[in-house]
Image (cartoon, coloured by chain):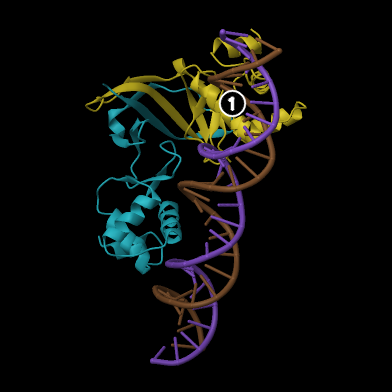
Chain colours: A yellow, B cyan, C brown, D purple
Amino acid sequence: MKSLEKIRNAGLRPTKQRLVIADILLDGQNRHFTAEDLQDEISSSGNYMSIGTVYNCLKKFRECGLIKQVKYSKDTAVFDTNTNHHHHFLDEETGQLIDIDNNKVILKNIPEIPNGFINNGVEVIIKLKRNN
Amino acid sequence: MKSLEKIRNAGLRPTKQRLVIADILLDGQNRHFTAEDLQDEISSSGNYMSIGTVYNCLKKFRECGLIKQVKYSKDTAVFDTNTNHHHHFLDEETGQLIDIDNNKVILKNIPEIPNGFINNGVEVIIKLKRNN
DNA sequence: AAGTAGTTTAGAATGATTTTAAAGTAAATA
DNA sequence: TATTTACTTTAAAATCATTCTAAACTACTT
């Protein structure tokens, strides 16, 4: 599917900037990146985009489910193009994330959900340390 | 154990400010709080502390294992006086955390650890949504 | 073709956290 | 005990990621 369609299907107006970003991000590969990482990639691809626009686009993309946002990695916001339910390995030293397929983790037991709430997804983080 | 001893045992110099913080935090109760929350509590207790000192102390306390830091809750740093290995319920709306005892979660299967790394702890986050 | 509603932009503003450098204090040494 | 040394606290400035603002722009509708 072309970026134009993906953006239209998501209910967003296809601007030049959103197309540039969709071309970079939505290529089927799973990536983890910050707003600044993306701005650098945009530059490398011969385009220019203000950092405000990068943030705006990422926010819109997130709101309509084209990407996800990961909260536990670094202080800076990290985005994730893998929108399937999945887990992560996390190298706490560097903040690097590696995807874990949902079916690789099996939970035998989880506690009762507190009153007034419902379970809205379980996320497993396996923290890693370099072994040398 | 008195705060003075706790601080000494942790290898820190017991300053007036660290004692004030230890008196508030290390009372055996498990809390989640930000630097600003703590500064407010310090004020309520009739003391004053610059926000820089609050951050310095929390950093030192974290480094020597007197407290933990939780990364996935809010944009602001959240600290945790529960230093045991445990998991969390997370209300994504409010950022509120509730502890889950380690033994309440049983993992039947976890994936192979990537080459060059060792498993440095598994953390489970059960995201919550208000049910109304 | 004209209108309007949403978007981009530079730059300012914000908010959390860190840094700076001077003054203060606990611990070590004489 | 007095002196020295290293660490700590502080206010204020600096930093950094992110959001806001308001003007210019552009996609879509009429």
SS of the residue under disc 1: helix
Q: Position of residue A99 (x, y in %)?
A: 53, 23
Instruction: Describe residue B90's horizontal placement relative to residue A3 as left or right.
Output: left
Residue hosting label 1: A57
Q: Position of residue B98 (x, y in %)?
A: 29, 36
Badge 1 local density, few (<14 within 10 Å), some, or many (20+)? some
- Which chain does the residue under circle 1 lie in? A
Instruction: Describe residue B36's horizontal placement relative to residue A15 as left or right.
Output: left
In which image quadrant can residue D5 be found?
Answer: bottom right
In which image quadrant can residue A81 be found?
Answer: top right
In the rendered image, which quarter contains the C terminus of chain A? top right
Q: Using the image, determine if residue A54 lies above or below residue B42.
A: above
In the rendered image, which quarter contains the N terminus of chain A? top right
Considering every residue shown, the one lying at the far left of the view is A115
In which image quadrant can residue D9 be found?
Answer: bottom left
Q: Position of residue A108 (x, y in %)?
A: 32, 20
Q: Using the image, determine if residue B6 lies above or below residue A1.
A: below
> What amino acid type should be assigned to the residue bearing mark 1?
Cys
* Residue at image point 26% right, 62% down: B2
Q: Nearer the viewer, residue C27 or B93?
A: B93
In this orientation, does residue A27 appear?
no
Q: Nearer the viewer, residue C25 or A8?
A: A8
In this orientation, does residue A101 appear?
yes
